[in-house]
Amino acid sequence: MTILEQMLERCSQAGYTTTKNVEKIANAKKMMFGEGEWHRCPCDGQNPNRYCISETCRQDIERDGECHCHCYRKKVAGE
């Protein structure tokens, strides 16, 4: 499974949706961290509490409507 596929699956399971940045973020993750650490946040890679759909990520989405790296967001009615 590719990084993008894993990101899409995790997002769907959490009940969120993605933004147009999802492919860019997936590519950044691959270049910066590789397949083994794909979940890490390329915008805050040294913070172990910030990764794809972590509690920190969820708090960002719930508070701001989108996550820290503008990859995941709340679903809008009808999505």
Image: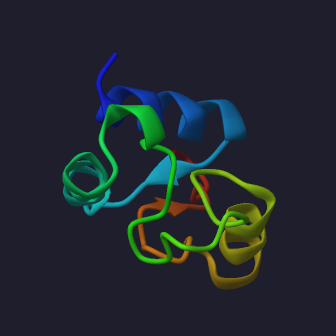
Q: Is residue 43 left or right of residue 2?
A: right
**Residue 60 horizontal/vertical position (percent):** 69, 76
Task: Decide: is 8 above or below 18.
Answer: above
What colour-coding does the image apply? rainbow
**Residue 76 horizontal/vertical position (percent):** 57, 59
Residue farthest to the bottom, as pictured? 64
Q: Is residue 60 left or right of residue 41?
A: right
Q: Is residue 33 left or right of residue 51?
A: left
Residue depicted at 50% across the width and 55% down the height: 40
Residue depicted at 66% across the width and 30% down the height: 13
Residue depicted at 54% across the width and 73% down the height: 46
| Quadrant location of the N terminus in the rendered image | top left
Q: Quadrant of residue 7?
A: top left
**Residue 49 horizontal/vertical position (percent):** 73, 65
Task: Decide: is 56 above or below 16.
Answer: below
Q: How many marks?
A: 0
**Residue 42 horizontal/vertical position (percent):** 39, 67
Task: Decide: is 43 above or below 50.
Answer: below
Q: Is residue 33 left or right of residue 64?
A: left
Residue depicted at 70% across the width and 40% down the height: 14
Task: Decide: is 24 above or below 3.
Answer: below
